[in-house]
Amino acid sequence: MATIAMDSAHYVVLGRGQISSIDDSMQSALKARTKTSNQQPLQAAQLQDALLTIKTVMGITGLSRSSVYARMDLGTFPRPIKLSKRCVRWTSRSIQEWINAVAGAAG
């Protein structure tokens, strides 16, 4: 059990996010601070030079992860840029061009 000081008062952390002697609004604020989000907003795709995560690409295109990679293997979907050993990103420009090409072929 650990104690934390917040606003000149002490609260007891019981474990796994349970906090004793704290009101609901303060507890939700504390939980919000401890959670980090790596989610990229879909609005990032509107930037011409944005680098998009796979989740954002999936959200924009409506394709599943496996469909994205299957289409890449077939050469019908843009390949990502490799930023590091375990990090790839797609340019928003390449995704938008793919969407325009698919829409042009369908229409």
Image: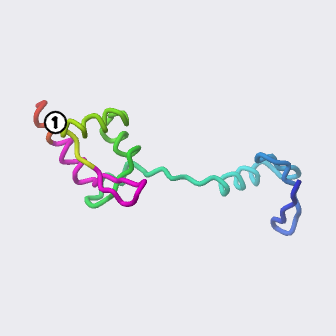
Quarter-of-image position of residue 68: top left
**Badge 1 local density, few (<14 within 10 Å), some, or many (20+)?**
few
Q: How are the residues colored?
A: rainbow
Indicate left or right for 92 with 105 as reference: right
Q: Residue at x 51, y 53 (%)?
A: 38
Q: Residue at x 28, y 53 (%)?
A: 92
Indicate left or right for 74 with 46 as reference: left
Extreme-top residue of the structure: 106
Indicate left or right for 44 with 20 as reference: left
Q: Is residue 17 above or below residue 74?
A: below
Q: Residue at x 84, y 53 (%)?
A: 13
Disc 1 on helix, strand or loop?
A: helix
Residue 86 among magenta residues: yes
Quarter-of-image position of residue 33: bottom right
Q: Position of residue 105 (x, y in %)?
A: 10, 33
Indicate left or right for 84 with 29 as reference: left
Instruction: Count the numbered circles shown.
Output: 1
Identify residue for label 1.
Answer: 103
Q: Position of residue 31 (x, y in %)?
A: 70, 51
Q: Quadrant of the C terminus?
A: top left
**Foreground of the two, 46 or 70:** 70
Extreme-front residue of the structure: 85
Extreme-bottom residue of the structure: 8
Write down the region rendered in magenta: 80-100
In the rendered structure, which amino acid carries the disc numbered 1? Ala
Q: Position of residue 14 (x, y in %)?
A: 85, 49
Residue 4 among magenta residues: no
